[in-house]
Image (cartoon, rainbow, N blue to C red):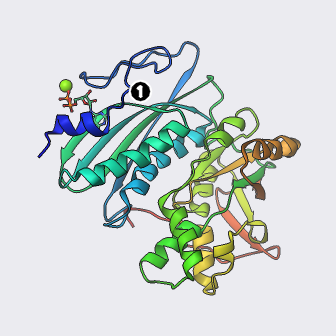
Amino acid sequence: MPSEFELIRRYFVRAGHDAPGPARGASAIGDDCAILAAPTGLALAVTTDTLAEGTHFLPGTDPRRLGHKSLAVNLSDLAAMGADPRWFLLAITLPEADESWLGAFAAGMFALADAHRIELVGGDTTRGPRTITITAIGTLPPGYALRRDAAVAGEDLWLSGATGEAALGLAHLRGAVKLPAADAAQCVLRLEAPEPRVALGRKLRGIAAAAIDVSDGLLADVGHIAEQSKVGAEVDYEALPQGAALAACSDRKLADECLLGGGDDYELAFTAPAAKRGEVAAAGRATGVAVTRIGRIVAGAPEVRVLKGGKPLAPQRRGFDHFR
Ligand code: ADP
Ligand code: MG
């Protein structure tokens, strides 16, 4: 049985990635703290997210995808602020030292890390119920963060990609719906291997006003912008993009619940003045991510209304809350 230190050395310390130096901007893994080279003139964006087995992922989830997702959910928070990813820490708790599981987990995590040029600089390894906590650190010019409290009445409301397929994939895995095989594969991929919209978030710096990443459900997360900005929001149901698998789902009630309140989408919802429509579209084209105008910010109570055929839909179940 390998020791804790042997596991860290084998799976989390990488040759060539662990040399301290200006490119890495951090000390090698192995001391009591990581020492980071504070970037002059930039602000730090720091975030942490936990994935716990049974709560955030099903037992038996493919470890490669879980490694990807554990980092992806944190990169998505950096994207939502418009930050450039720099460093991350990994706290991992495992029921046993399963080396094939660890190898696959690390491969999935580092493939995404390398794609976004973010470096693992330290962490913690313990035994217990399977839980992964990543803390990610990014940088951005001071004053350029995309905040939840910056939306203004009259602005457009935008969405990257499309929502709903991750939640539909989870419904399929739980047996609540039976999707055709190709649609099931697409939805489960969206659930287990989300692509954080890092490049788009960075491009939206100086263009978007408010932004949030959609993790708890579209209406819930737009609701956070509304509450923190003290404005209302209107979402045009007909404008919402739907992926092919969601559009083909025969259970329309379930499909709409996933679309509006499903969660685990890791898309960006953001606002921008109407004068910046061209710049938003260009940011989408430059980063290869579809961006769609889905509604508007309005004056008034901090509520989100969904309009279908111009008329408000009955209030929706808005999204996921761990304590409800
Ligand atoms: P300490 O006793 O100071 O908490 P640890 O024994 O937990 O230190 O960790 C030893 C070194 O290995 C530290 O530099 C720590 O950051 C690193 N480390 C531990 N677990 C991980 C991990 N899962 N990923 C990356 N680095 C890790
Ligand atoms: Mg110590």
**What's the residue at 82%, 77% (across, down)?**
309
Q: Is residue 27 visible?
A: yes
**What's the residue at 68%, 42% (across, down)?**
200
Q: Where is residue 120 in the image (x, y as percent from the top left)?
A: 39, 32
Residue that mark 1 sits on: 17
Q: Which of 303 and 246 is in front in this view?
A: 246
Work out which quarter of the rendered image holds the C terminus and state it: bottom left
Residue 67 sits above or below residue 175 on the image: above
- Left or right for 185, reference 323: right
Residue located farthest toward the left when viewing the structure as drawn: 1
Q: Is mark 1 within 8 Å of ligand 1?
A: no
Q: Position of residue 32 (x, y in %)?
A: 24, 23
The quarter of the picture showing ligand 1: top left
Residue 147 sits above or below residue 140 on the image: below
Q: Is residue 318 visible?
A: no
- Per the image, label 1 sits on a secondary structure element best described as loop
Q: Where is residue 209 in the image (x, y as percent from the top left)?
A: 71, 40
Q: Quadrant of residue 101?
A: bottom left
Residue 312 sits above or below residue 91 on the image: below
**What's the residue at 30%, 41% (across, down)?**
91
- Left or right for 96, reference 271: left
Amino acid residing under circle 1: His
Q: Position of residue 118 (x, y in %)?
A: 49, 33
Q: Which of 126 and 49 is in front in this view?
A: 126
- Left or right for 235, reference 54: right
State the count of labels.
1
Label 1 Cα neighbours within 10 Å, binned few <14 / some 14-19 / many ≥20: some
